[in-house]
Amino acid sequence: MKTEKIPYKIYLSESEMPTAWYNLRADMKKKPAPLLNPATLQPMKAEELAGVFCEDLIAQELDNDTPFFEIPEEIRSFYKMYRPAPLVRAYCLEEKLGTPAKIYYKFEGNNTSGSHKLNSAIAQAYYAKKQGLKGVTTETGAGQWGTALSMACSYFDLDCKVYMVKCSYEQKPFRREVMRTYGASVTPSPSMETEVGNKILAEHPGTTGSLGCAISEAVEKAVTSDGYRYVLGSVLNQVLLHQSVIGLETKTALDKYGIKPDIIIGCAGGGSNLGGLIAPFMGEKLRGEADYRIIAVEPASCPSFTRGVYAYDFCDTGKVCPMAKMYTLGCDFIPSANHAGGLRYHGMSSTLSELYDQGLMEAVSVKQTDVFEAAEYFARIEGILPAPESSHAIRVAIDEALKCKETGEEKTIVFGLTGTGYFDMVAYEKFHDGEMSDYIPTDEELKAYRAKLPKVN
């Protein structure tokens, strides 16, 4: 075995935990395009968002200039139950691959929700409680976000209503039951509970749902229920802000040992994990202090970066939300029922979309069976059963390490292991039984969805 001074797991002390979230937008010379009011096509104002989001979260969402937001003490105290999260040196994986590359992964699965989602869930629940609300509504894909939010709402004594993408609701009953254990109500989406749900079902009978559908239902429920607001687990600027604790901890851990990564890799659905992981590194890149190769990995079945267009689009299928400029496949796009439910969103964070459009990061798409092949390989070698979403980053990390083996380059690779896959065993079963498919949308299909994009100058 290798005998280097770098430990297998780099832990930070509580005193080394971030005390402020980092707002990446403050260092962007060209800011992300603003959210638009679909009725006026003008930038959304705080008062227009007040009926949907919490007041403090609106301020975070719209702030492009404040570099740091202090983390309230109540949230920092909650973080201490499962943070700091370890940065792990994948010695066993390196040895098995026979690569000269050094591989590290930031593991975010050491809490009951099983993922990084709790970092933002507790923040959003805190601000809802501070505002005196009764509860919140949300959507969830694979269920990590819904699980995290139900935990956070339970902690702050808030009601939690979750609309879960129907195919995930059926594929992942145990994650659904964890949400219910923490007191949340969970509804498969699209449902008959909302007007927009009824409309979607009428237009797409038998649909397995999408995050865009579930968002529409959750927003409608929030604006029609007194004392409720809507909260979102990805995509929004405020979520990337909260998730910056991932990257801040990662950078502090690497700096302790004088390690500078060459390649940083994260899975990409809406952008919360990727945006959080790369935040301080991208900040250095924007300020001209350092350079990194940053790779976003998305499913080939829902390829917003690699095959989408950079345009204004609705954030939800029911078209009840503001419009965002982002890499999108079209808000009507409903991806195949793949098993990486958290990556089944039609668009990408406006912040990450702008960075990608400027050429500051790369993107690749990978097939589902290749992802699960990497997940199984990683589980057998590193001893952690990864979530399907995380396994997209694992796939590309392995591929990059094998390239180093071919060239003899000793690159340092860091990737985000967003969570565990213990509630995703139906997916692993399909893979092992040879029943997993690799559906990839055709150019003709994507062209039809793009044709429906709103006309915004």
Image (cartoon, rainbow, N blue to C red):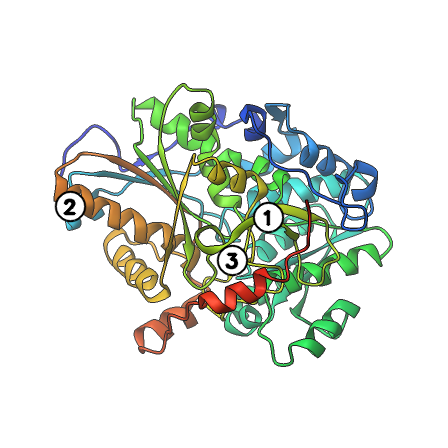
**Looking at the figure, which quarter contains the N terminus?**
top left
> The residue under label 1 is which amino acid type?
Ala
Residue 277 occupies which quadrant of the picture?
Answer: top left
Q: CA distance from mark 3 to mark 1?
A: 22 Å
Q: Secondary structure at mark 2?
A: helix
Give the mark nearest the N terminus, 3 or 2.
2
- Disc 2 versus disc 1: nearer the observer: 1
Q: Secondary structure at mark 1?
A: strand
Q: Position of residue 12 (x, y in %)?
A: 41, 29
Q: Which residue is mark 2?
A: 95
Foreground pick, 202 / 74: 202
Task: Determine crowd level at label 1: few under 14, some 14-19, many 20+ residues with C-alpha closer than 10 A.
Answer: many
Residue 351 occupies which quadrant of the picture?
Answer: top right
**Does the rendering let one see residue 101?**
yes
Q: Which residue is mark 3?
A: 342
Give the mark nearest the N terminus, 2 or 1.
2
Q: Position of residue 293 (x, y in %)?
A: 34, 35
Residue 405 occupies which quadrant of the picture?
Answer: top left
Residue at x-position 69% and y-position 72%: 200
Question: Which label sits on residue 107?
Answer: none
Foreground pick, 166 / 133: 166
**Compared with residue 82, is residue 12 higher up or lower down, i.e. above or below?**
above
Q: Which residue is mark 1?
A: 311
Query: In the figure, is residue 228 to the left or right of 123?
Result: right
